[in-house]
Amino acid sequence: MECIGVASRGIVHEVLTRYNYQQWKTLMKSYLRGENLWNVVENGYASTPIDAQRDAKALHIIQLSCAPNIFEQIEHLQTAHEAWNHLAIVCRSEFKVQPHILHDVVSDFSEHKALYKFVETGDWEGTSSYLRDQPHAIFWVPPSGRTVLHVATIEGHITIVKGLVHRENQLLEMQDEDGNTALALAAGYTGNIKIAKFFINAEGGEKLLAIENKEGEIPLLLAANSGRKRMTRYLYFRTSSDVIDKQSSHNRVLLLERCIQAHIFDVALKLLESYKELPIESLHVLHELARMPSAYLQASRWQTMVDSLKNESTIMNLCGLKSKNIQGVFGYKNEFLQILRYYKDTVSKLNSSQLRDDLVYDAMLEAAKHGNVEFINDMREANHDLLWAMDNHGRDIFSYAVLHRKHNVFQLMHTLCGNKDIINYSTDMFGNNLLHLAAPLGPLSDLNLRPGAALQMQREIQWFKAVEEVVHVKCRGAKNGEGKTPEEIFIETHKELMKDGEKWIKETAGTFAIVGVLVITVVFPVVFTVPGVLDPGIPFWAMEDRFTVLIVADVISLLASIITVLIYIDLQTSRYAPTDFLKRLPIKIMSGLGFLSLSLVSMMIVFCAALGIGVVILTGFTFILLVPSQLRLLLQIFQFITANPITGHQKSTFIGRIFRKLLLLPIKACRH
């Protein structure tokens, strides 16, 4: 570990960017007040050593809390007061009120208003009639600079577009007040590929691909910026390399960045293939690759499943797709991973200083934050030192994995062999070890996926226990800079979640206990009641098979209901310690729900045996509708108990596997 990358990260939850200024301002103001530094930020400071020291500390905090592009705006400023006021100007100027694309189409002018109304509503007969009477009106331009062709393009009226171009081809090159041609509007705003194809295939239409608007952007860049995938692909293959590189290589890098942001990976891959050697400025794209959500990268995992399934019909049944679409979905190649390989080769040629200057270390931390383990693996293969990227707080990628609850990155610790000890002992600048970082409540984005506060609490304990296993024993009781141990922080930050979990369990237990009592009141009298006569002269008890089924099912339903009520009464009176949420309470919920489901099914069998085939059909339909919803919750609780995605361990027993299959059968039956 010769070099440690240092990334610009702040005290607040998210660094300052162009889009989160108001939230950042509120959080930063609270933090500075807590540190008794707000006065020097708000009013400046007198020339005393103490105030100068406080100002330097406040300025340093603000600088650390800015994203790299924002930090560049204030790095030359010497006081916190100047930096704070300058950030207000810079960030607010990023938000400019832009008129809607349809603004000033028909209103705000009186001349030729009828013509524009015909075009806007798609009335070609009215448009043609008006232009026959006033042919010069076709070139008339309102204050917005938008001709009738611009309006027809915005509204998507292909018939009027064709008619106008056939009448006057010069309309194609006319630009509005923003410098946009009709093709530019189709590319960047409407995404109407039929209209775009017509423009380009028209006489002289290919010249439109090179016309820049006032921002210096060609239609291809506008399409990529809007994330219009089909339009971007089409325009890329119609736009020559000379047009893309007309000003500088910056356009190509900008297009590459926008394609990656919009997940247009096939075009991004073509752009990379056009380079003999990637320019240094293209390394900034690494941040976009690193921020790719881990959920999007499931394509590579799906590919493994496809390769393992030899029966194509099975794949189609699983995905609900026709065979010709399978290759399009799974790809049989992952463009994202291919793009990573290009950057992997480039990164492998850079020295430590270049890696820092080009913010590659920062990209590693971004990847850890978003759970992009594919990015981390490729970059560490390019340069193993990147695995030890660290921010200004002394937090590495594993710290980020714990803070943001990214279990796939956390599992990389098992591959470190001897180097794992470095992480086990490490602490950040606030004296926090990994277990301290696992103690606070996790991100809401992770917890919202959990079925109920109790299982949220269970997942939090699983994280705490998983980290506890990898840190050194002395770290478990170590105190951070605030004098708190990990366990103290965990209990303090999870009080509300524990209350919510206890409330969720008691409400669930109360509801299911009432259902269990109702079932008992229904099935209990059946044992002591002799059924009546079904047909004249034939008592029900004479039908031995149905009578036996009725009695057995009734006894099972009664016993299962009693057990259910006893379990949920126990839940109502149980103690609720943090460790109880790990296994004891979820197992009781699962057991009670299982017995309740058994009692309900048995009760339906009792009624079916007593009343005949018509009721069998009706109750079977009811079972298909209602029971699977409860079984899904039961299966989800079971998975929480037997599987731990944080460590990658799967606790599976023979009974557990049988139970899982039994739970899945009715759910699969419903889907089919």
Image (cartoon, grey):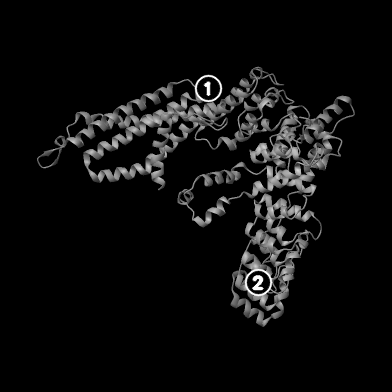
Number of the front mark, 2 or 1: 1
The extreme front residue here reads 310
Q: Is residue 545 above or below residue 126?
A: above
Residue 307 place in picture, x, y as percent: 53, 46
Cα distance in 3D space between marks 2 and 1: 70 Å
Residue 459 place in picture, x, y as percent: 54, 30
Give the side of residue 128 with respect to residue 651, left or right.
Answer: right
Give the side of residue 257 with respect to residue 459, left or right.
Answer: right
Residue 552 place in picture, x, y as percent: 25, 31
Which of 366 and 225 lies nearest the eye of the viewer? 366
Residue 114 found in image quarter? bottom right
Residue 283 place in picture, x, y as percent: 76, 46
Residue 287 found in image quarter? top right
Q: Is residue 565 above or below residue 265?
A: above
Quadrant assignment for the N terminus: top right
Residue 35 found in image quarter? top right
Which amino acid lies under the numbered mark 2 shown in the image of this protein? Tyr
Residue that numbered label 2 is attached to: 116
Which of 134 and 206 lies nearest the eye of the viewer? 206
Residue that numbered label 1 is attached to: 579
Upstream in sequence: badge 2 or badge 1: 2
Q: Is residue 424 above or below residue 374?
A: above
As helix, strand or loop, the secondary structure at mark 1 comes to: helix
